[in-house]
Image (cartoon, grey):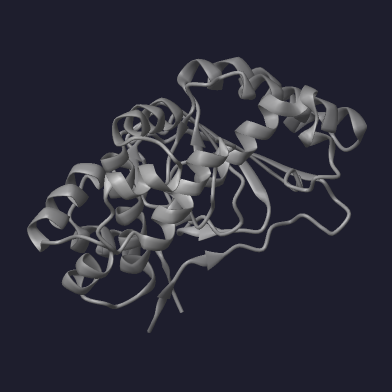
């Protein structure tokens, strides 16, 4: 018996743009899954449920709204401590080739939407006020029927959501297998170097030299550009790769620790628990429990 992530076959046909499901249910019972199309998922009355997106896990409140635009990013809402008997869920699945340079998404009027869709490759959780602001539009979308006006309404929804810059990226980019960001060439060059050498000892001075800056100036520049200290970013990348291997392989925790760039098992366990809320073994077991047995 082997446990795997369910690859969901969505109801969208080749020539359809969007599928909308509006349902009331008493429990979360669908396993961890991924799918080719993008998804906007709204949940009301689900307080206490646990949402897992990539290597990010958290217990949700009464309102939850998440956008996922990556085709291989695992996600699930599981029952956990949810006691509600009336969970309202609206799911919008859609196909939007926003990375294609020949689409309007690369033009100025679409910049906020494009940036949001990029960030959502890691999963994007919106604040409560955002969920409240589009709830009426989402409900209207479920009653709109097919056609051009439905698509117009959908674009109004994603445009409104793109205004919320405080939406939170969930999974680490290394776990989600995406390179998210439209940073300067210097930042992208450094991130690419870290992605290729995360298992090695990475020194500040060599990264600064890579982009022609002094170590002090580079530290300030990197933090201002990414919102994270360099050391914090490197740890996140390493933990993302480690989490991916915990899910996809049967390698031992100690082997994963050292091949992910950590020097000691104790430090790896401490940082993993601090960032993920559980130790590596618990993380692996939690994922196994939410997968499909085939």
Q: Is residue 58 above or below residue 237?
A: above
Give percent across and percent down for residue 161.
Answer: 62, 23
Judged left or right of residue 167, residue 234 is left
Picture quarter with the N terminus: bottom left
Q: Is residue 247 above or below residue 221?
A: below
The answer to whether residue 82 is seen in the rendering is no
Q: Quadrant of residue 279?
A: bottom left
Query: Quick one: 248 or 257, which is closer to the camera?
Result: 257
Residue, x 54% and y 50% (percent of image)?
179
The answer to whether residue 223 is seen in the rendering is yes
Query: Quick one: 22 or 26, which is closer to the camera?
Result: 22
Residue, x 22% and y 45% (percent of image)?
277
Give percent across and percent down for residue 123.
Answer: 51, 42
Q: Is residue 33 above or below residue 45?
A: below
Q: Quadrant of residue 46?
A: top left
Residue, x 78% and y 35% (percent of image)?
105
Residue, x 24% and y 43% (percent of image)?
275
Give percent across and percent down for residue 77.
Answer: 43, 46
Q: Quadrant of residue 35?
A: bottom right
Judged left or right of residue 134, residue 213 is left
Judged left or right of residue 123, residue 160 is right
Give percent across and percent down for residue 23.
Answer: 60, 39
Q: Is residue 105 above or below residue 79?
A: above
Query: Quick one: 293 or 203, which is closer to the camera?
Result: 203
């Amino acid at each position: 018996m082997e446990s795997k992530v369910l690859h969901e076959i969505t109801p969208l046909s080749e020539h359809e743009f969007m599928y909308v499901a509006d349902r009331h249910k008493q429990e979360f019972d669908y396993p961890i899954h991924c799918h080719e199309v993008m998804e906007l998922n709204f949940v009301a009355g689900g307080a206490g449920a646990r949402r897992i997106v990539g290597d990010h896990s958290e217990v949700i409140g009464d309102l939850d709204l998440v956008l996922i635009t990556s085709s291989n990013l695992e996600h699930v809402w599981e029952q956990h401590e949810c006691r509600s008997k009336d969970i309202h869920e609206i799911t919008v699945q859609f196909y939007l080739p926003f990375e294609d340079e020949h689409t309007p998404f690369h033009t100025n009027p679409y910049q906020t939407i494009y940036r949001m869709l990029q960030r959502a490759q890691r999963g994007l959780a919106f604040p409560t006020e955002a969920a409240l602001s589009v709830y009426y539009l989402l409900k209207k979308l479920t009653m709109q029927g097919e056609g051009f006006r439905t698509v117009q309404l959908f674009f109004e929804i994603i445009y409104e959501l793109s205004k919320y810059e405080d939406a939170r990226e969930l999974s680490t980019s290394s776990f989600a297998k995406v390179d998210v960001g439209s940073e300067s060439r210097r930042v992208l060059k450094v991130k690419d170097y870290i992605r290729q050498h995360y298992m090695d000892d990475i020194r500040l001075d060599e990264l600064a030299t890579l982009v022609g800056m002094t170590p002090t100036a580079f530290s300030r520049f990197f933090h201002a550009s990414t919102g994270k200290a360099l050391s914090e970013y490197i740890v996140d990348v390493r933990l993302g790769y480690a989490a991916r291997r915990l899910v996809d392989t049967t390698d031992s925790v100690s082997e994963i620790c050292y091949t992910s760039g950590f020097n000691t098992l104790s430090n790896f366990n401490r940082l993993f628990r601090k960032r993920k809320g559980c130790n590596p073994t618990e993380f692996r077991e939690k994922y196994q429990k939410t997968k499909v047995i085939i």
